[in-house]
Amino acid sequence: MPEQPPALETLSNSFVSSSLAPFRPTKGRVAETSELRSTEGQDSPGPTSTRLDVGGQRLPIVITAVAGTWILALALGLLGPLVAITFPALTLTAIAATLIGVRRYQPRLRWPWYAFAVGFTLFLIGGVARDALNTLGDLSANRSLIPDLVTIPGYFVILVALMGFVRARHRDRATRLDLGLDAAVAALAALAIAWVFLMNPTLILNSAPMSVRIVVATYAPISACLVALTAGLAFSTGGRQSRADLLRMAAMAFLLVGDVLFMVLETHSVAIPQRLIEVPYALALVAYAISALQPSMRQQTEPDVESENTATVGRVVVLGLALAIPGFIAVTRPPAARSDRLVLGGIVFGLTALAILRIVRAIRGRARSEARLVHLSQHDALTGLPNRIGAQRHLTGALDAARAAQSSIALLLVDIDRFKLVNDSHGHSFGDELISIAATRVRRSTRPLDVVARVGGDEFLIIIHGVDRDEDLLDLAHRTRRLFSEPFVIHGSEVASSASVGVVLADLDDPDVTAEGLIRDADTAVYQAKDAGRDAVVVFDHGMRDRVYQRLTIQRDLRHALGRGELSLHYQPVLDLPSGRVSSFEALLRWSHPAWGQVPPASFIPVAEDTGLIVEIGAWVLEQSLVQLARWRDELPHGGRLGMAVNLSARQLRDPSMVDRLDAIIQAADIPRDALTLELTESALMENPVQAAEHLARLKALGIRLSIDDFGTGYSSLAYLRRFPVDDVKIDRAFVVGLESDDSSDETLVAAIVAMAGALGIGTVAEGVEVEHQAARLERLHVDRAQGYLYSRPVEASLIPAVVARLEANAKGRLMPVRERFSA
Ligand code: C2E
Ligand code: CA
Ligand code: CA
């Protein structure tokens, strides 16, 4: 059910500023950071980087160019003594790039980045120590293990950093475990290869002490693990790999290549010029440094929403290759020593176990995701509450159970007032936040047994068990309504709100009562609560359904009524009481519906007001009636003095363009401005008194006359009358009816109104004068003018000349007794 009729979307600004005032944040600003975070594109810079980013992409390019040239020179042997500073310089660059990247792109989680920097620092210290102690290739017992004991922990720190990324990216434990398993499979496969080609040959080097052998054999497998984890991380995202992902993967691959070469060099298996071993490390450092300077580096620590344990092609290929490796080794390797076979056997065993575990988990995961899908289809993602479907299921079950237990079920449907406008004016994340807070409040206020569901954008349904006394339900409903009148603090701003509540008590004896029907009834009740001015509680009754239906059909057909020429105006003369002459007319709208016949204004005007159609229709009324008036002023005898009163709705008064449009209409009709009187009810004025006073002042400045309609039925205070530049008050028919009897209380009231108006220089018009007795009393009370069936019903324009002629004729016979005067 729409909270507001559709036409409200074309609200004028002034309306927004008046009626929406409660929804304006009263302090603070709307924090947009969190929105930006989630909508950020793959490589778009984060919000804080916009300023810094002017030269943002320059730095990686500079690094690439300088370091690329340097590395090329290194590979070609052109660097000479500068070779020695390559590694320290690039390591420092990588550390600096990490720190700059963190500062610039403000990732949500920082410690993994700092861990990277720590890892590199350890590499730097280890590398410097290695050069200083000259341990490279020294496999003797004299070799100092210090460089290795510094460097190897560096690898572990980086491993931990990568795990930090995994944790941050995958909130879901199951996904993390799967990722770990995949990485472990890949790492084991890499280990198998490393074992065969690097570790085993190293470890069986009898010349070196065992400690040295172990240390030297460690590098390659650890970097294999790093590659595996990095790849796993990159391929675990549902979407494309980001540039930062790919660069980091390249960095880890280069590191592995470097480590393999390093091992080869240490063990003297193959002769490689020492500067060449620096190349892969250098490339690794540069690739890493650039990756840390990519805007997409932020995504490393953003929760990944897309990947729901997806089997990406990359993942499947890596796994397939990993599992194929032991077979490949078994086929190609000659029979090996027992220790060798044991290690390889262990690896194969481990791989198989991991693969089985992974498959089992994949199958379970499927079942899990199916269950999840069912859950998702019945729950709302934002609040986690059941959605409309879930609510219906719950309710159906609850109805059956309550019927069996002879208990009761009631529904409260809560609809947040003007929520659509909050969403439109503050953005959806603001609205979402409001809903979340509201959901928590409602959830907390209900008993554990009662079910709270979110059944629409701004609607909560509460299924209440075992409360069947009307007053208890009402009490509950009002308590729920009040949950919304406490201000909501959203993104640091306080927002006032309210809610309309519909209440339905299920009639369990009626077998036709269904969940769906009950929710519809609750909807109907909410609709009525909105109609009653919002922030209200309405209990459903059966007549309501028909009324709502009627209203909706009126709304539907009224949209076309003007275009199809179904609307017309009737005019009712207003007489000057002392002289008995016609002074003006009131224009009254009529709708002749092709199927329903005459629709009373009381049925369709409120609908026109609600939907905003009154703005268009009202303009038409003004145009028509003023053109008509101009004609009568020309054509009728003594017509030059005639005026026209037109009813104006609050909605029209709010329209900021109204004054100018009205002036244009008056000018087009070519009548003096004071020939027009606008009739406004007190409630229309009180809806927004400040704005009303302002608009009325502008109308008054034009020279248009203003009248307060239905006077006496609303606030009717003197202070209030003084506030607006009013020319007339129309004394409501209710008081005029009272003049018929001899009860003098209404007479006193009318006398008071006349006295008060006279003191303020305001004219009085009595409406609904039906019998002479009333007319005579009004005249005695010095009411200025009168209108009513006694003189004439509202009639179509073509009949007015005859009506006026009759009334004027009566006026000439003023000396006749009243009875005879109006007997025609
Ligand atoms: P209202 O402005 O108070 O209009 C006076 C109502 O009293 C009219 O009802 C009129 O037909 C009726 N009436 C006049 N003399 C007598 C009488 O002696 N006895 C009785 N019982 N009734 C009498 P109507 O035409 O049904 O209009 C009802 C309401 O609809 C109006 O009340 C006004 O609020 C609204 N309305 C009518 N036309 C327009 C329009 O063009 N624009 C707006 N915004 N509202 C309109
Ligand atoms: Ca009126
Ligand atoms: Ca009236």
Image (cartoon, rainbow, N blue to C red):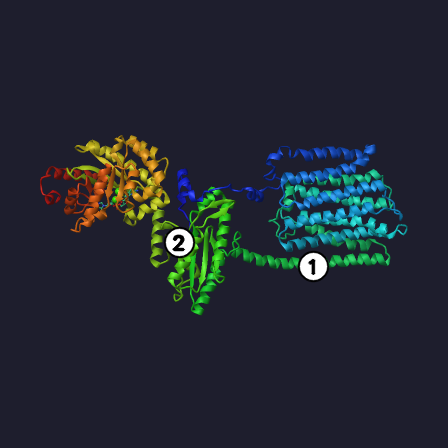
Number of on-image labels: 2
**Looking at this rendering, what residue extends furthest in the bottom direction?**
405
Compared across the picture, whether 159 is left or right of 622 comes to right
Q: Nearer the viewer, residue 785 or 399?
A: 785
Q: Where does the image place residue 823, in percent across and percent down from the top left? A: 12, 45
Residue type at mark 1?
A: Leu
Q: Where does the image place residue 312, in percent across and percent down from the top left? A: 65, 50
Compared across the picture, whether 585 is left or right of 439 comes to left
Residue type at mark 2?
A: Val
Q: Say if residue 706 shows up in the picture.
A: yes
Q: Where does the image place residue 641, in percent across and percent down from the top left? A: 20, 33
Q: CA gap, disc 2 to disc 1?
A: 54 Å
Q: Which mark is residue 357?
A: 1
Q: Say if residue 10 shows up in the picture.
A: no
Q: Where does the image place residue 225, in percent across and percent down from the top left? A: 74, 50
Which residue is at a point 87% across and 42% down the rendered structure image? Answer: 271
Q: Quadrant of residue 824?
A: top left
- Is disc 1 placed on a helix, strand or loop? helix
